[in-house]
Image (cartoon, rainbow, N blue to C red):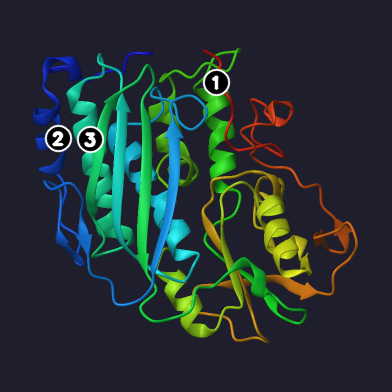
Amino acid sequence: MQRVPDLDGPLVSDLTEREVLAMITSRLRPAVTCTVGPGDDAAVLTPSGDLVVTSDLMVEGPDFRLSWSSGFELGWKAAATNLSDVAAMGARPSGLTVALATPVDLPVRYLDEIARGLDAACATLAPGCGVVGGDLSRSRVLTLAVTALGDLEGRPPVLRSGARPGDVVAVAGDLGWASAGLRLLFERSADARGVAHSAGLAALWSESPELIAAQLAPTPPIPLGVEAAIAGATAMMDVSDSLALDASRLAEASGVTLHLRGHCLGDYPDDALYGGEDHALLATFPGDAVAHGFRVIGRVIDPREGAPVVVDGVPVSLRGWDPFSVSEVTKTGSAAPSRVLPSR
C-alpha cells in the first residue's frame, strides 16, 4: 500500500478494534429515525413508509487514490454516492452502515478523517441521516462497503421503468464535471504510467476547485429526489457510470428511446456523455411538469431499434465505466470512463 502522506500519530495496528470503533463512533451524530444505534448487534430504525436499501463498494485503486483523496474527502464521497442512489428512488435517506477493511499500517488519523467526512456528508446533503452501524476488518488495500437506507414516506418508489413517449427528460446536478476533474488529476498529479502522486494537487484545488471537488468530494442533489417524486416523476436514476450508459438503462427498462439535446449537455459534452461519477439525478416527467431544480435536456420518444439514446437524432455509443471491461479503461477522462484501473 502507498503510504498516506502527512499523517502522523498511531497506526491502526497500534490500537485494538474496540479503540478504533470508539474513535470512529465518537465522530458520528445519530440518525433521526434511529432508535438503537451503534453498540448493539444491529441498529433499529423507525421509518414512516417502505424502506429503500442500496449498497456500494469503494476499493483503493479502481475507485480512489490515497495520493489524491484526504480521509475526509473519501468519507464524504462514500456517503454521497450511496445517498444519491436512495434519492434516485424518490426516498429520503435515513441511515448508513459502513464496513471498513483497512491495512494495518494505515494511520489512525486517516480513519478519523473518514468518519468526519461520512458525518459531514450526511449532515450537509441529507440532514437527519447518519451512520447507524458497520464493521471493521483487515485488508491489503483500503476498502469501504456502504449500505444506505431510505424512507419512501408512503410514496411509491420512482423506478427506471416508468418513462413514456411524450415525457420530458431532465437532470439535476452537473454533468461531465467529475470526468473533467479526473482528467486534470491524471494530467497534473500522476506520472507517465498513470500512478497517482500528490505533487500538483494543491495547485489543482486552487485553479479548478469545482472540477476537482466534483471528482473527489461530489455534492449530488439529494433532496431533489424527493422533490421529483412529489412532482410526479415517471422514472428516475442516479447517473454514475456515464449519461450514455445510465440513460440507456432507463430507456431499455421503459421500452423507449431518450432523445437528448446536445446543447443541453453543458461545457464538457463528451465528459457528460461518457464520463462517470457525476451522481446527477436523471428523471422523466409527464408534459412539462418538471420538478424545481431539474433542467430539461430532451424528450422521451417511441423506441428506435438499436438506439436507446440519441443526441440530436444521432445514436450515441454506450460507453462508460464497467469494472469488468478492461478494454474500455484508459488513463484519460474525455470520452472515456471516469474511473480507471490502477497502475500499481
Residue 94, image x, y percentages: 29, 63
The tag earlier along the polypeptide, 3 or 2, is: 2
Q: Which of the pair 202/44 is nearer the observer?
A: 44
Tell whether label 1 touches label 3 (CB within 8 Å).
no
**Residue on which the image places disc 1:** 342
Give how far apart the Cα atoms at labels 3 and 2 are. Answer: 13 Å
Q: Amino acid at mark 1?
A: Pro
**Mark 1 or mark 2, earlier in chain:** 2
Judged left or right of residue 117, residue 252 is: right
Q: Quadrant of residue 98?
A: top left
Task: Tell whether 327 sits left or right of 85.
Answer: right
160 in relation to 7, above or below: below
Q: Is disc 2 placed on a helix, strand or loop?
A: helix
Which residue is located at x 58 percent, y 68 percent? 236
Q: Residues within 10 Å of mark 2 (few under 14, many from 20)?
A: some
Residue 113's label in the rendered image is: 3
Q: Residue furthest right?
A: 305
**Residue found at x 46% / y 70%:** 225
Q: Position of residue 35 (x, y in %)?
A: 14, 63
Q: What distance separates the C-alpha of mark 1 from that of mark 2? A: 29 Å
| Residue 196 at x, y percent in the picture | 48, 19
Left or right: 340 in relation to 69: right
Residues at marks 3 and 1, CA–CA distance in whole angstroms = 23 Å
- Judged by depth in the image, the label closer to the viewer, 3 or 2, is 2
In the rendered image of this protein, does residue 335 appear above or below residue 32? above
Q: Where is mark 2, residue-wise? A: 21
* Residue 219 appears in the picture as rendered: no
Please, is residue 69 above or below residue 140 in the view?
A: below
Q: Earlier in the sequence, mark 3 or mark 1?
A: 3
* Residue at disc 1, secondary structure: loop
Kindly identify the amino acid type of the residue bearing the numbered disc 2: Leu
